[in-house]
Image: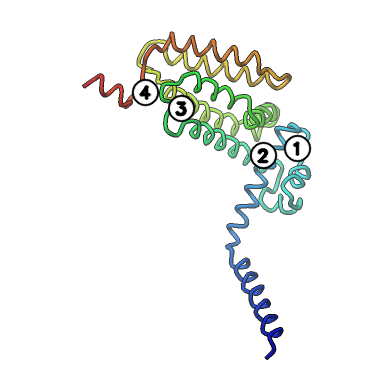
């Protein structure tokens, strides 16, 4: 057997093994990846084109799949965007949890700025498009309302934790919620114009207001709090 023949057979064997490995990838994993791409594409389309412009064909093109592939996972447009509602809710919660994995270390200015940034980013923009769509689509409305309530509670809980707020004190809960409502309003304003300069001044002012309202509170379980209590 010549060297060239042996090399050819080795190359053929290598290609066959790679093909076999690819074919052995579980179909459910490939399906999960495709579904994830479709949901991300749906969110991106909502943020860029709004509800009216986010057709199934547009989402399919954005995801790089056929219209048939979309319909395999989501038989109707409503099915696709109802799933996108859930995806957006989970992504927003994940983004919130990832803000300060080691805690905020008492830096309320950083917490205020980070939370405001969440309300002016692409995930919130996509969520707003879903709100608008849900106001006219009965099938979306109940799901959007339910998920937004969940995200709202999660956002409030994380804000309280990161700001070191003690909600047992009168007015603290309302103060934190007022800040979050303000941040949501900044997100709305940012839809039409780049509000960066004004937003920075508002972040600074709200940090001052929160410092005055919350004082030197620390989160429950904070080591400094335990030390002072001992």
Q: Which residue is mark 4?
A: 219
Assess disc 1: are there few (<14), some (14-19) or many (≥20) residues with their C-alpha within 10 Å of its C-alpha: many
Nearest-to-viewer mark from 2 and 1: 1
Q: Is residue 94 above or below residue 175?
A: below
Kindly identify the residue that appears in the image at 66 percent across and 47 percent down.
Answer: 37
Q: Percent position (x, y) of residue 166?
A: 37, 18
Q: Nearer the viewer, residue 6 or 49?
A: 6
Q: Percent position (x, y) of residue 102?
A: 42, 33
Of the two numbered discs 1 and 4 on the same chain, state the one appearing first in sequence.
1
Within the image, what quadrant is residue 86 found in? top right
Q: From the viewer's perspective, tell me whether residue 215 is left or right of residue 189.
A: left
Q: Is residue 188 above or below residue 87?
A: above
- Assign a secondary structure to mark 2: helix
CB under 8 Å between discs 2 and 1: yes
Q: Which residue is mark 2?
A: 81
Q: Is residue 80 above or below residue 147?
A: below
């Amino acid at each position: 057997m010549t060297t060239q023949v042996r090399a050819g057979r080795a190359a053929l064997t290598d290609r066959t093994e790679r093909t076999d490995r690819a074919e052995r990838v579980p179909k459910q994993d490939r399906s999960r990846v495709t579904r994830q791409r479709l949901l991300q594409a749906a969110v991106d389309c909502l943020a860029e084109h709004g509800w009216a412009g986010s057709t199934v064909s547009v989402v399919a093109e954005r995801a790089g799949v056929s219209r048939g592939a979309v319909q395999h996972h989501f038989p109707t447009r409503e099915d696709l965007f109802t799933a996108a509602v859930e995806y957006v809710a989970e992504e927003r919660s994940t983004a919130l949890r990832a803000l300060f994995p080691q805690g905020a270390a008492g830096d309320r200015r950083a917490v205020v700025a980070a939370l405001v940034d969440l309300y002016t980013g692409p995930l919130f923009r996509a969520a707003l498009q879903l709100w608008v769509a849900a106001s006219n689509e009965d099938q979306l409305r109940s799901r959007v309302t339910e998920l937004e309530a969940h995200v709202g509670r999660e956002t409030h809980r994380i804000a309280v934790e990161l700001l070191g707020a003690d909600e047992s004190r009168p007015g603290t809960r309302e103060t934190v919620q007022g800040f979050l409502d303000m941040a949501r309003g900044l997100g709305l304003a940012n839809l039409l114009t780049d509000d960066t300069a004004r937003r920075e001044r508002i972040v600074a002012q709200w940090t001052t207001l929160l410092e005055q309202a919350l004082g030197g509170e620390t989160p429950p379980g904070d080591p400094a709090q335990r030390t002072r209590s001992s």
